[in-house]
Amino acid sequence: MSAGADHGTKPMMDQLIVQSLILGLLQGGLYALLAVGLSLVFGILRVVNFAHGEFAMLGSFAAVFAVTSFGMPAWAALIAAAAAGALVALITNVVVLRPIYLSRMRQKGEYTIIATFMLSQFLIAATTVLFGTTYRNLPGLWESNLNFFDYVYLSGNRLVAFSAAIVMIGTLFWIVYRTDTGRAWRALTQSPLGASVVGIDIHKYANYAFLVSGAFAGLAAGLLAPLMFVFPSSGVVALVKAFIVVIIGGMGSIGGALAAGLLLGVVEVMGTIFVASGYTDAYGFALMIAVLLLRPAGLFGKMGRAI
Amino acid sequence: MNGFLPLSRRAMLATLAGAAAVTILPTVSFAEDDIVLGLVSPLSEPGDVRSGEAIKKTADLWIKKINEAGGIIGRKVKLAVYDDQGKVEVGVSAMERAVTEANASAILGVWSSSVTIGQMEVAKGYDVPLLAFYSWSDEVTSKNYPQVFRIGPYNSQIAAQMVPFVKERGYKKVVVLAEDTAYGLGFAKAFEEAAKSLPEVSLEVVQFQAQTQDLTAHMSKIAASQPDAVIVQTVFAATNLSIKQGREVGLKAEIITGWDWPLLPDFWSTVGDAGVGVIYPTFSDPSMTVTKVGQDFIDSYKAAYGSDPAIFQYYLWDNFNAVKAAIETTKSSAPADLVKALPDTKFEGTIGPVFFRNEAGTVNFHQWDKFAMFFKKLNKVGDGEAQAELVYVVK
Amino acid sequence: MSVPIEITDLRVAYESDVEILRGVNLCAAANTMTAIIGPNGAGKSTLLKGVAGVAPVTRGEVKLGERRVEGLPTVDLVKAGISFVPQESSVFGQMTVAENLRLGGWHRRSERDWLNQRVQACGALFESIRPYLERKAGDLSGGQQKLVEIARGLVGEPSLLLLDEPTAGLSPVMVREVYRELARLKERRSVTVLLVEQNVREALEVADRVYVLAMGQNDTEGTAEDVSERLESIVRNWMSREGSGVVS
């Protein structure tokens, strides 16, 4: 770098720190949105849903087809994504999971893991057969690359996605802490027995939880799609990120998922830029392992049962 | 139990693959006198089926034309087709069956480098020629197996051909964005080595995990260092991601893709405007010299399938002709005779005369390398091969 | 408000051929407290669970007032006025005591004014939890948590309250605390209570009537005074029948 250059090394470094911090937070918001549904369902039903990533993937496909086959606008595509995610999640609960937790078998938890894992594989294979492995693109709501004072560079779609994620997580908070549905969910999370004796209909609220979980996954994927691509196995990485967030944030905690999502995003981006670029996914795992060793119940362990 | 499990699974896979091959592929009866060539290619998922189908079409066409012309040394030629599913263990067992059951004189059509490298051991064990054409790993020929030949490019040569291009464009600062696989890192290493001849160019390698779905962090880092050019060495999806997200985070450098991925049909629909200005290297260009043999291949291919063959299919055509030339020289279809004759075989290929370099101890062993590399630029959304601007040729 | 309960030949079986409850009859007048005692495995808890819809009823009748309720799902039993306080802890630990109580009126949650008034009333019911309505239920002592559950069970104005060993696992101090409050509850005469208890002495002190079960069937019954007097012979009878009587 010559002495006369516009950017010295120092300001360039500052720029990169600010850029990476912002990128990390924006990315993290979407991780959190992917994870809250997983966390909700786990908290309420103790079901570890391995098909959560595929709810997201199917949501993004629904959004793509809404735009390409039905000519819907971008905002309607997001609604289609949420609706598709919710529908698939509801069907999963009723058809795949309910028979398991209604049965008298032991180790229901293990069976739900196997069942949802198989479902995940099936959905990936079915999508591949039906739609092929072609990469697809989804137009976003704000298709332009923004440049803030030559200092921070972002796409409009990324800002839209983050804002929507925060609004949605805020909405979920409101549902959980201010509505009867939220009270029922919290009751089920904290004591399924207590919930049953006060007359809370577990099937109804489990369905609601799956609907919301699937809608959030589909919406998250619909928001992510303009930033990345849509293809059948896209849910696998999404699930891994969501799991890391749930484990770091504490199983069943929404606030924990938000904080952990933001943390994961920042750690991944910062690690990639300032430590070594070849280990992006490894930073998340390292963070997760550190949390498991130091605070096994997650960073927000105390709130862990609060969903 | 644990120690025995992986083995049994492997065996099971091989058996399944074998069973699938038996049931799916029509049983061919081979007359005593027929010459049999083995075609082992990715014909089902997770293999690269798109390429596998192109390989099969080329091979079928060649066999048809040869037999119409009276065969080789008066004998009919037949193809024994096997599916490698893009998996090493399946490819290896398929090749073994081609040799032992179908008595193939030579094996052609091999695709993925990792599968080819596995199959090389079978070639060595049975002393049967194995001809590669688009398995880019240097290892295929640098191992110097007497039975293995390649008519087609390899990593370090492609990297070396990038160097005069970088010099010609006047880039001073170049970043190689490489996926962490043998392909990506192999290229990065070879390019670093080759670029030593350009001391005025500063070079940085940024590595990323091949399965990633987000490259914004990597691209931000690269953008901040303000390079003149970024060479992206990865497969189709990540290439597109790097282009789209690079522009998103303010990358102003020229982007050179590792291969001609931008010609795939979903390129423009996934990257959009960000694809404008992208430069890609290729071995194929309308300005390329095509021989009479080549023109005949192109015409017959068009007549048979209604589309132009891709460049790698030219090399495969040459592979078949190499085997034909060797059989004609030795008047024998015995694999061991062909292994002896092939290194000195010369014939008219599709884009020029074909002969093998036989420099023992180097990658240029049983290797033909006389092809030009073209650098082409996409100047507007939707540009394809015909519209792309030819910016540089390395001969 | 309260309705008498009449149980006739109630049978419960988890597996089709193993009956835990083999035909039990029980009758309780409105607003009385009935204790159900018996040795381990007599089917006391199973009887409550059968009535509460938690255990599978295979035969028999449960009449709440004039209404047959056996076999209804728990959600409907709660609406019918049956409130079950299980032996295991069932408080919502991360919620305040007041929030716990509010959930006790879940089936009538749309009647806000009524619910607010009930939460207030039931929060004031037991002295030992009255000062702690805004504390998290999980932070209270085991005895206080049990009282929260009982109070929660009363918020919905049930006609029948089923208490399954409310003092199991509690220290003697807490046992006394819970029984002091149960005695007060009985004085109010506002709900019919079926109380299953291992602490026979405490149960007899608060109960109006007592049913003794053994081996999944009725053994004997009577007023609390009557059973207290016969207690020794009753227990001896258990011992002789089972070889190992258990009374704590």
Image (cartoon, coloured by chain):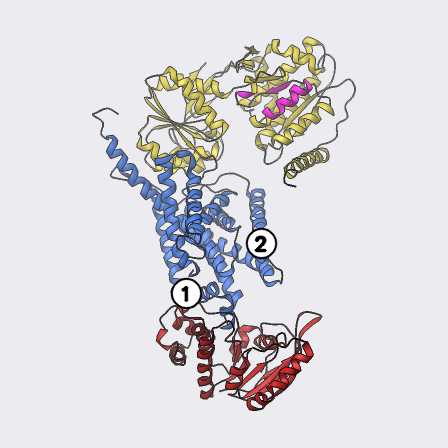
Name the chain letter of the residue that bears numbered label 1. C
Pointer 2: what residue? A110
Q: Which amino acid does label 2 sit on?
A: Glu
Pointer 1: what residue? C94
Look at the image and say whether residue B3 sits in the magenta stretch.
no
What residue is rendered at 55% in x and 45% in y?
A124
Tell me which chain appears blue: A
Task: Give the answer, above or below, for where B357 lies relative to B216.
Answer: above
Viewer-side residue, A199 vs B307: A199
Q: Chain C is drawn in which colour?
A: red
Res C142 quadrant in image: bottom left
Look at the image and say whether residue B128 sits in the magenta stretch.
yes
Badge 2 marks a residue whose secondary structure is helix
Please, which residue is most extreme toward the left here?
A4
Task: Give the answer, above or below, for where A130 lies relative to B263.
Answer: below
Q: Colour of chain B?
A: yellow
